[in-house]
Image: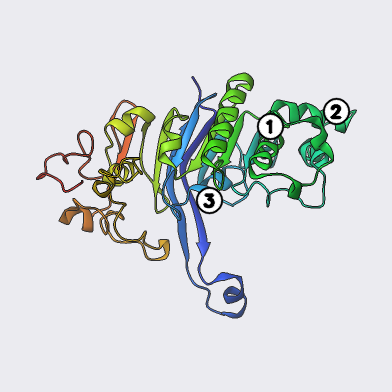
Amino acid sequence: MSPLLAIEDLSVSFTGGGVLNRLINPFPLPAFNVIDSVTLSMLPRETLGLVGESGSGKTTLARTILGLVRAAAGRIAFEGRDIRTQADFRAMRRRSAMMFQDPVASLSPRLRIGMLLTEPQVIQGVLIPDRRAAARALLALVGLPASFVDRFPHELSGGQARRVGVARALAMKPHLLLADEPTAGLDVSVQGDVLNLIGELKRELGFAAMIVTHNLAMIRHVSDRLAIMYLGRLVETGPTQDVFSSPMHPYTATLIQSEPIPDPRRRSQNPAVSGEIPSVFRRPSGCEFHTRCPIAQERCRAEPPAYRQISAGRMVRCHFPLETGGQEPRNQPKGKLP
């Protein structure tokens, strides 16, 4: 099956110092990569979980796919066409959509819900004989009453605003949905409702979904594959159940082990990743995770690891990938992972 989305060696560069610094400084600071050499693909109807800590580059990657952030290098192909050309990019934007992290702030406070829901169709030049009827149909799709067409965003609860965001994203019947932290700020019960809604609509409408999150407990139950990011690079990809049962990268293993467990006797056995994520402006030498890795060796500090295939469907960026369950690195003394 041909991939719906294919990303090859994608890099995104920012310049340090901010806009004001660049305006007043005659010697601009050098650019640095916030996304570095990312290669990733998605199949039609697939759900991909893009996972990592805050600052790992997940949202920047999603925004770059939709053209909201400009790529410095690399290739993005959507449905077999390179979207760097203007014509293909416009076609891609008609068949893709993004749900932003803040469901209320992403909606204009000046427009009623009915206008917000049909706005994507108007922008794309789609003829709508009756905007109110189209808005009511979208509200019904996400389980909201038709009367919501006359409400303003501030009159919605967090869960209702998220459902409106889902409806707005699906207004153009996209082939690809990018959801940035779709459960952020919601109660646990509402999180489940939103995830179930996205899953039901995905099966009904047949779109693929990339879900950006740091919530491993949530993504485990909704994704087909996982892509783990650290400091703007992918460090591991693979089928979700395989990654959870036998993580290959120490970063992945520690993230999984640090997930909260509803058992007071086991909480102390699951520490979070030690230390802080480094700055992309001053990347560590060698493997960038070596400053926080509990099993780092001298080679890790000096030599950057290649992103390579370990087994069918499993890719990892590590000199000494873990064998099973985060227990022991290959060809090395026993690791110190908890």
Which of the two residues, 128 or 266, is positioned nearer the viewer here? 266
Residue 306 x/y as whole percent = 29, 44
Q: How is the image coloured?
A: rainbow
| Residue position for label 2 | 133
Which of the two residues, 88 or 181, is positioned nearer the viewer here? 181
Spatial CA span between label 3 and label 1? 22 Å
Q: Residue 231: which numbered mark, if any?
A: none
Q: Earlier in the sequence, mark 3 or mark 1?
A: 3
Amino acid beneath label 3: Thr
The reply to whether dot 1 and dot 2 touch (C-beta < 8 Å) is: no
Q: Residue 60: which numbered mark, if any?
A: 3
The reply to whether dot 3 and dot 1 touch (C-beta < 8 Å) is: no
Residue 177 x/y as whole percent = 60, 34
Spatial CA span between label 3 and label 2? 35 Å
Q: Quadrant of residue 228?
A: top left
Q: Earlier in the sequence, mark 1 or mark 2?
A: 2
Amino acid beneath label 1: Leu
Under circle 2, the secondary element is: helix
Q: Residue at x 20, y 46 (%)?
A: 337
Q: Residue at x 60, y 28 (%)?
A: 197
297 displayed left or right of 56? left
Residue 260 x/y as whole percent = 36, 44
